[in-house]
Amino acid sequence: MSKDYYKILDVDKNASSDEIKKAFRKLAHEHHPDKTGGNAEKFKEINEAYQIVGNEEKRKKYDQFGDAAFSNAGFGGTGMSWEDFMRAAQGVQSGFGNGGVQFDFGDASDIFGNLGEMFGFNMGGGGRRRRTRGADIQTELTIEFADAVFGATKDISLYKTVVCEHCRGNGAEPGTPIETCKTCKGVGYIMQTQRTILGTFQSQNTCPDCRGEGKRAAKKCSRCGGNGLQKDTVSLQIKIPAGIDNGQAIKLSGQGEPAVNGGTTGDLYIKIKVKPDKNLERSGDDILSIVEISIAQAVLGDKITVITVDGELTLKITAGTQSGSVFKLRGRGAHNLNGRGRGDHLATVKVKMPERLGKEEKRLFEELKKLEK
């Protein structure tokens, strides 16, 4: 029979992650088997439900396929049986709130990572710290209207974190050794014991002195203080792609902040601001403009000059053109950012009415008025 994990946790299907977590915490306290009045089967059921709907990726699969997506995956989709879970969580000597259990959490990181987050203890696996990733950074670059249409190359300067040139990122003063960390004895982690409602747990945590490396500089770099990083001004040449629009961003992989201890460098995002043009506007890949013509040109037709991104071009005004009519110059717009040709130039006609009329002009309009009758 299909299981309704939302019903088990007593939450709505559209409940937020925080609401699901809060519901699980409440039920876990209520039904824990080592607590007076606890219920092992119910505890198993709510833990299984939380392992699915409390995980964003698994929740998506469950919402689409139901619990069938995890029917062969063991307890909570983790590959563990309930017996495995209980042996790990309780142990032979464990009691609710006073047991003593020690095991490697790395083998059950999926299920216990969530439980650790719930009850406030670190369940992360031991060993040396994973290489971190440097932070992404963002800056702005203002370009001309034409540069956005056709593309350009620009030089920018950034004041950002870089790898220390003095120690080349290892944090040690040049010529001095790097020694085994005395705090963790070179293993990169320290053991900590914490009490929780599930018992007393011993966990492995990254060594605060060597940051999980297992070694540290005998003498810290005089320039960066042993961090391996420093602030400096960096010059970059940026290629502006043809067709980029105001508010869009360019991503430069590996040009963000470097990571401590040689991890992956973050990315740089350059947000583009396009200066407005006094004659032209942009709508997607199309360029818009307004052209003024006289009453005579509108009535009789004419050839006029239109300012475009390609320079001045001739536009033929047909006889009887109405104010507000739009003429299209095909392929005279902005380049498509994905390389699919160019947009069009759309010229909207505005018939300019004379503010004052001379005697002869007034006479001619009066004659025209008579003809219209």
Image (cartoon, grey):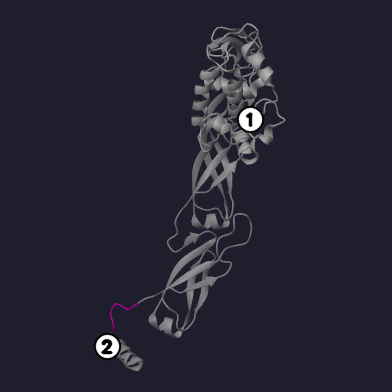
Residue located farthest toward the right when viewing the structure as drawn: 72
What's the residue at 45%, 71% (across, down)?
348
Measured Cα–Cα span from mark 2 to mark 1 = 80 Å
Q: Amino acid at mark 1?
A: Thr
Q: Residues within 10 Å of mark 2 (few under 14, many from 20)?
A: few
Q: Toward the viewer: 8 or 221?
A: 8
Rendered view: 352 above or below 333:
below
Q: Residue 359, how many percent across, how many down? A: 27, 88
Quadrant of the image containing the N terminus:
top right
Q: Amino acid at mark 2?
A: Lys
Q: Is residue 323 magenta?
A: no
- The residue wearing badge 1 is 264
Rendered view: 273 above or below 216:
below
Q: Residue 332, how many percent across, how many down? A: 56, 66
Residue 95 relative to residue 289: left or right: right
**Magenta part of the chain:** 353-359
Q: Toward the viewer: 324 or 223?
A: 324
Q: Toward the viewer: 120 or 326?
A: 120
What's the residue at 64%, 57% (across, down)?
339
Judged by its main secondary structure, the magenta piece is loop
Q: Which mark is residue 359?
A: 2
